[in-house]
Amino acid sequence: MLDPELLERITARRAELDELEERLVKRLAEVRAERDELAVAERVLERVTGQLAEERASAGPAPRQVAGRTVMLIPHREPDVEEDSLPRDYQRIIAAVRQAAGPVMAREVGEVVGVDISVKAKLEPLRSKLVRLVDRGWLRKLPDGRFTTRL
């Protein structure tokens, strides 16, 4: 006859193993789902990186290395330098200033080029670009802080 204590131990161990198997199956399903998500993320990243590379290639002047950092050079305005040598976003800024009836504030330029002017943190980079264009001779900044094209 079978020992009841031994049968009880076998039954208890089988229950432990069944429980462990359930946990492992659940964990394996979680791992596989996460791995699938990572594969999708990787494909999206590759596609977006390719699109950005295409946009950058068609955007005009390429970034250059200065002191070990990649920067976009904005040339000084000279008779032989055309506006199309500027990056596209700078060309749009100059066009927005030109279209205005008179001198404009950075906020007005932001409205034309599509910057969220209600958020100061988004307006400041535009203001920086306007000042950079002033420094390079493409625009003029009036004492009251408004910008205009150079005449």
Image (cartoon, rainbow, N blue to C red):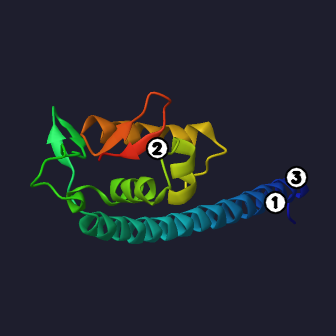
**First reached walking from the N terminus: tag 3 or tag 1:** 3
**Camera-side mark, 3 or 1:** 1
Q: CA distance from mark 2 to mark 1?
A: 67 Å
The local secondary structure at tag 1 comes to: helix
User: What whole-number distance in Å separates the C-alpha atoms at marks 3 and 1?
Assistant: 15 Å
Three-letter amino acid code of the residue under disc 1? Ala
User: Residue at point 28% right, 46% down?
Assistant: 138
**Label 3 SS:** helix
Residue 107: assigned label: none
- Residue under numbered circle 2: 126
Q: Quadrant of residue 137?
A: top left
Residue 5's disc is 3
Spatial CA span between label 3 and label 2: 81 Å
| Disc 2 to disc 1: CB gap under 8 Å | no
Determine which residue is flagged by label 1: 15
Q: Quadrant of residue 42?
A: bottom left
Left-right relation of 80 to 4:
left
Residue 56 sits above or below residue 124 on the image: below
Please indicate whether residue 78 sits to the left or right of residue 15 in the image. left
